[in-house]
Image (cartoon, rainbow, N blue to C red):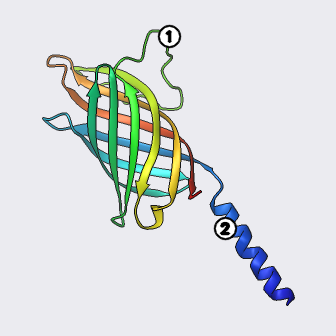
Amino acid sequence: MKKVILGLLASWTVTVLAGQPNDVRIDVTGTFDANRIFIGTFTASGAFDELGSVQDTPNFVGQAVHISRLMTTASGEFIVVEINTTHVAGLHVTPPDWCAPPPLPPGALLFYQTGSWKVAYGTGPYSLLQGNGKRATWLLFDSVSLAPIAATECLIGDAKDGP
């Protein structure tokens, strides 16, 4: 009887711990195609450790940018993250010190954006994943055409496995 009670307590503890939020950081790098679609790679650490590819579906509304990001893990699972940001960081916003800017190549301009993110849904082991936090991205633009070339991005926040 004592073993059964200890076993139940152990499984209850694991379930409770699995639902606790933990720090997460997701680093993303990539380039823009001719249609200004961002495609790249990500590395996540903290609440979950994963790597894979990303592809954004942006929706521009005035100065606001709403992005649905499909993150495909190395094992083929999906995590979809919704991102909200603006084109204009503003004069009173300090660049984030937790997301280092990339090197500035000749002929490029560097701008940053800040915003927020949240997990919309996932598949497989990420089907119950919940998370949200802050976003910072450094955008490289061609100095002549002003077309976006590449981006380096950091997402930080909390994530947990289910309610």
Name the residue carrying label 1.
92
**Three-letter amino acid code at disc 2?**
Thr
Nearer to the camera, 103 or 49: 49
Q: Is residue 162 above or below residue 59?
A: below
Picture coordinates of residue 155, whole percent (x, y): 47, 39
Q: Which residue is drawn at 14% across and 35% down?
A: 35
Q: In which quarter of the image is the N terminus?
A: bottom right
Dot 2 lies on which element? Answer: helix
Give residue 115's quadrant in the image. top left
Nearer to the camera, 76 or 108: 76
Picture coordinates of residue 33, whole percent (x, y): 17, 38
Q: Which of marks 1 and 2 is nearer the N terminus?
A: 2
Name the residue carrying label 2.
15
**Three-letter amino acid code at disc 1?**
His
Give residue 91's quadrant in the image. top left
Dot 1 lies on which element? Answer: loop
Give residue 127's quadrant in the image. bottom left
Q: Is residue 139 above or below residue 133?
A: above
Q: In the shown orientation, is residue 85 left or right of residue 96?
A: left
Classify mark 1: residues with Cα within 10 Å, few (<14), some (14-19) or many (20+).
few
Q: How far apart are marks 1 and 2 (CA)?
A: 44 Å
Q: Which residue is drawn at 33% across and 37% down?
A: 67
